[in-house]
Image (cartoon, rainbow, N blue to C red):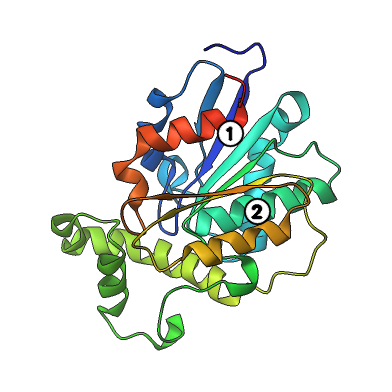
């Protein structure tokens, strides 16, 4: 089903990730939804730029990338894990800047800002060599052969440390509920529970949803098609 009004779906990656993670995602949407993966400084297509290590600077960068579209056409934001929290921050910043709000936020595998956690047992600064990678492997987002490559570890470690430090040091300010529906998506076997996902509703003045998929923290890489269908039906409920 085609729709006269096109929506841009900005996609924000997880900690250490880049826009290439969403390379296949756009293939599963109708022409009425344009998928635009975003990269942050120091990652992906922007790998030569200095890394940012605060949630505030990361979300400001993302909003500047969205701004031209936000001022001219409908848009929505999808963010996975840390990217979900950044999606929420972008909507808050958009409101503060008097920019049009997104049609919806799709927050994947992320607990609410007041319950933010890195998943680490101890602060990043106290981790022993190898502990960061043990955690990354447990989360399941990296193929074992790749994660064990010394070259890959050297490449990824500064990005992961910057992102986890941003999460660890984030102290989100209280805010009024956003006038944007928040749709939480989770993996049934993830550490983010359905009960926690439902808490996102208190951050919105419009009813949202919670959708569970089989799998763990990185459930989405096995459910791109179903996730795209869910987002499409949510953005265009009549079609």
The CA distance from mark 1 to mark 2 is: 18 Å
Residue located at (60% from left, 55% from top): 86
Q: x, y percentage for residue 160?
A: 40, 65
**Image coordinates for residue 191, horizontal then vertical, percent:** 40, 69
Q: How many numbered marks, from 0 up? A: 2
Residue 176 x/y as whole percent? 83, 60
Q: Does residue 52 show up?
A: yes
Please state if 212 lies on the left or on the right of 208 as rendered.
left
Q: Where the C terminus falls, by quadrant?
A: top right
Return the residue found at the far right. Answer: 98
Please, what secondary structure does the residue beneath circle 2 have?
A: helix
Which numbered disc covers residue 88? 2
**Secondary structure of the residue carrying numbered label 1:** helix
Mark 2 is surrounded, within 10 Å at the Cα level, by few (under 14), some (14 to 19) or many (20 or more) other residues, namely many
As drawn, the label of residue 234 is: 1
The earlier-in-sequence mark between 1 and 2 is 2
- 126 with respect to 198 (left or right): left
Whether residue 213 is situated above or below residue 166 in the rendered picture = above
Residue 215, given in percent of the width and then of the height, sits at: 31, 54
Closest to the observer: 137 or 224? 224
Quadrant of the rendered structure where residue 27 is? top left
Question: Is 52 or 165 nearer to us in this picture?
Answer: 165
Residue at 69 percent across and 42 percent down: it is 64
Residue beneath the point at 45% across and 32% down: 228
Q: Horizontal placement of 145 versus 43: left or right?
A: left
């Amino acid at each position: 089903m085609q729709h006269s009004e096109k929506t841009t779906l900005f996609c924000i990656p997880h900690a250490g990730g880049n826009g290439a993670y969403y390379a296949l995602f756009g293939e599963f949407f109708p022409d009425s939804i344009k998928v635009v993966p975003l990269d942050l400084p120091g990652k992906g297509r922007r790998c030569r730029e200095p890394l940012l290590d605060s949630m505030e600077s990361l979300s400001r960068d993302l909003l500047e990338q969205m701004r031209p579209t936000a001022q001219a056409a409908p848009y929505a934001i999808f963010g996975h894990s840390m990217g979900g929290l950044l999606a929420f921050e972008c909507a808050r910043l958009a409101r503060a800047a008097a920019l049009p709000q997104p049609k919806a936020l799709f927050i994947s595998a992320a607990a609410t800002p007041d319950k933010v956690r890195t998943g680490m047992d101890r602060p990043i600064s106290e981790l022993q060599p190898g502990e960061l990678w043990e955690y990354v492997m447990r989360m399941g987002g990296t193929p074992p052969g790749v994660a064990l490559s010394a070259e890959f570890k050297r490449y990824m470690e500064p990005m992961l440390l910057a992102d986890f430090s941003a999460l660890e040091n984030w102290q989100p300010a209280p805010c009024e509920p956003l006038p944007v529906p928040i749709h939480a998506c989770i993996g049934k076997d993830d550490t983010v529970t359905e009960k926690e996902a439902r808490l996102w509703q208190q951050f919105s003045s419009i009813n949202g949803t919670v959708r569970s998929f089989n799998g763990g923290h990185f459930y989405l890489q096995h459910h791109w098609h179903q996730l795209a269908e869910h987002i499409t039906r949510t953005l265009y409920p009549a079609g």
